[in-house]
Image: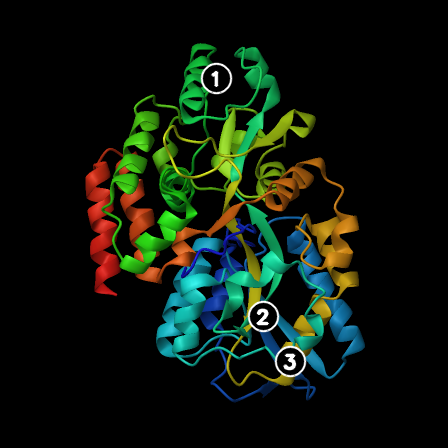
Amino acid sequence: MSAPVTAAGAASSAFSRRRFLGTASAAGLAAAGLSACSDSGSATTDSEGRTVVEWWNIQTTEPSKSVWPDRVKAFEAKNPDVRIKLVTLENDAYKSKMTALTSSGKLPDIYHTWGGGVLEQQIDAGLVEDLSSSVKTLNGTLVPVSVKAYQFDGKTYAVPFDIGAVGFWYNKALFADAGIDAPPATWDDYLDAVKKLKSAGTTPIALAGKEKWPGMYYWAYLAMRIAGVDGMQKAADAKDFTGDAFVKAGERLKELVELEPFQKGFLGAAYSTPNGEAAVMGNGKAAMELMGQWAPVVQADSGKGIGEDLGFFSFPTVAGGKGALTDVFGGGGGYAVRKGAPQAAVDFLKFFMTAESDRILVAEAAMMPVVKDATDALTDPNLKDVSEALGKATGFQLYLDQAYPPAVGQEVNDSVAGLIAGAKSPEQVARSVTQVAKSQ
């Protein structure tokens, strides 16, 4: 992801992320594997003569899993000469597939993006449609921060459908049982809370170690809290993450890992599978998870959900750090259009982002509003907490695995995963990320 969006992927569907996340079905992967994305400048028609628009998304969990097809049906009812072909993939499978398609120069007509460096790379390759003029009617109707990750050199290359922030989701009942009266606001207090939870016989943190990106959130936030948002940008510009702030971020994360705070078998745990991070949290088997605004939905979908016991708090500050408690890490989800896609692709996105449609996404799919006139549809208290955090944000950093070029983002994920597994030192993480960054 290039410049931090000074507001929150993801970074989401990750931010983006996602959100937005789930488990790929065999049928979904098969559809993706067999699908032949259109060549640039071409359009396809079906046996009925309808223009076919292929739309790749990552909405694999309910309720959005059902809302997305409903939005397709609503559009097709008004546009009988168009067929929207919906292709749904799990988050990691989607990223792998898109990396291959980007290399081949063939992208879906409409596809999910978290913006930042990954989108910029596709733009530089001439694969993305400039939407500045075609979505001009949306100008002024969208929440300003929601579009930042998709704008480069004054041009807009994607339309947002979600925006959010990563923070700690916690089980109020388990906190109370451990004698923790209030969410910790400093890193030292956070470590103390972890110790109290362990002493009470509670697993402090649920983590999907297998998927790597959830662990990246810890290092990224610690780096933000120590270096500050400006420091993050300077490191990205210099392609140098060997500075003291980034080494210290690894040291603080190592302190946490040494407390053994994660659930048994976390290194092999996925995010949204029945025994994954979201299920562990959603079934009340862990006290916390660091995740985006989609967390409550996935917890309820993968597990049972913990209802009113669920709370949200911002990532703690680090003593001596330049970052503020109100600096936010996160992102959103958006949709870009391939260069040369049929006009129907743009028409669908404009339909998808009307206030009427966004209210449906907010009310029925648990999305954060990106259309100003749809904010009144936000009633979920947990999402209101996230919205409040975004409203108070003094700085914003886009998900690192989207803010930076793909190879750099992958190295951040891999290196941090190595640190959490005990295979890499804080210094090695900083050097590895820098080495890859300088090679780009």
Q: Is residue 341 left or right of residue 430?
A: right
* Residues marked 2 and 3 touching at CB (< 8 Å): no
State the image coordinates of residue 300 (x, y, percent, origin top left).
63, 37
Q: Which of marks 1 and 3 is nearer the N terminus?
A: 3
Q: Which of 213 and 395 is in front in this view?
A: 395
Q: Which of marks 2 and 3 is nearer the N terminus?
A: 2
Which residue corresponds to the image point at 55% horizontal and 23% vertical from the top-left? 183
What kind of element bears circle 2? Answer: strand
Q: Quadrant of residue 307?
A: top right
> Where, quadrant-wise, is the N terminus in this rendering?
bottom left
Residue assigned mark 1 = 202
Residue assigned mark 3 = 134
Q: Which of marks 2 and 1 is nearer the N terminus?
A: 2
Residue assigned mark 2 = 55
> Where, quadrant-wise, is the C terminus in this rendering?
bottom left
Q: Nearer the viewer, residue 398 or 48?
A: 398
How crowded is the residue under tag 1: few (<14 C-alpha within 10 Å), some, or many (20+)? many
Color encoding of the figure: rainbow
Q: Is residue 438 left or right of residue 318?
A: left
State the image coordinates of residue 31 (x, y, percent, origin top left).
51, 67
Which residue corresponds to the image point at 60% horizontal and 49% vertical from the top-left? 61
- Separation of residues labelled 1 and 3 (CA atoms): 53 Å
Q: In this view, does 106 lie to the left or right of 341?
A: left
Frontmost of labels 1 and 3 is: 3
Residue type (three-letter) at the residue carrying disc 3? Ser
State the image coordinates of residue 210 (x, y, percent, origin top left).
37, 42
Residue type (three-letter) at the residue carrying disc 2? Trp
Residue type (three-letter) at the residue carrying disc 1? Thr
What kind of element bears circle 1? Answer: loop
How crowded is the residue under tag 3: few (<14 C-alpha within 10 Å), some, or many (20+)? some
Q: Is residue 101 visible?
A: no
